[in-house]
Amino acid sequence: MGDEEMALVPDVQYGLS
């Protein structure tokens, strides 16, 4: 998981992706 890269996007992004 790229939490560091996805840090700028909300948790919603994980659910959609």
Image: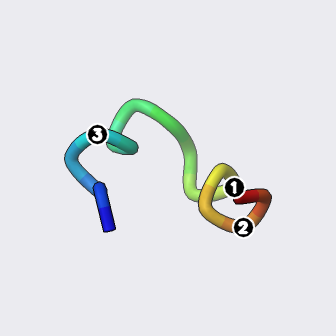
Residue 13, percent from left and from top: 65, 50
**Farthest residue in the left direction?**
4
- The residue wearing badge 1 is 12
Tell me the kind of residue under disc 1.
Answer: Val
Element type where label 2 sits in the image: helix
Image vertical order of residue 8 relative to residue 11, above or below: above
Q: Which amino acid does label 3 sit on?
A: Glu
Which quadrant of the rendered structure holds the C terminus? bottom right
- Marker disc for residue 1: none
Q: Distance between the residues labelled 2 and 3?
A: 16 Å
Regarding mark 1 in the picture, which secondary structure is present there? helix
Which residue occupies the extreme right position in the image? 16
* Residue 10 percent location from the top left of the image: 56, 45
Q: What element carries label 3?
A: helix
In the displayed structure image, the side of residue 13 where residue 7 appears, left or right? left
Q: Are marks 1 and 3 in contact (CB under 8 Å)?
A: no
Q: Mark 2 points at which residue?
A: 15
Whether pointer 1 and pointer 2 mark residues with C-beta atoms closer than 8 Å, the reply is yes
Give the labeled residue for mark 3.
5
N-term mark: 1 or 3:
3
Dot 1 alpha-carbon crowd within 10 angstroms: few under 14, some 14 to 19, many 20 or more: few
Residue displayed at 51% across by 37% down:
9
Earlier in the chain: of badge 2 and badge 3, it is: 3
Badge 2 density bin: few <14, some 14–19, many ≥20, Cα 10 Å: few
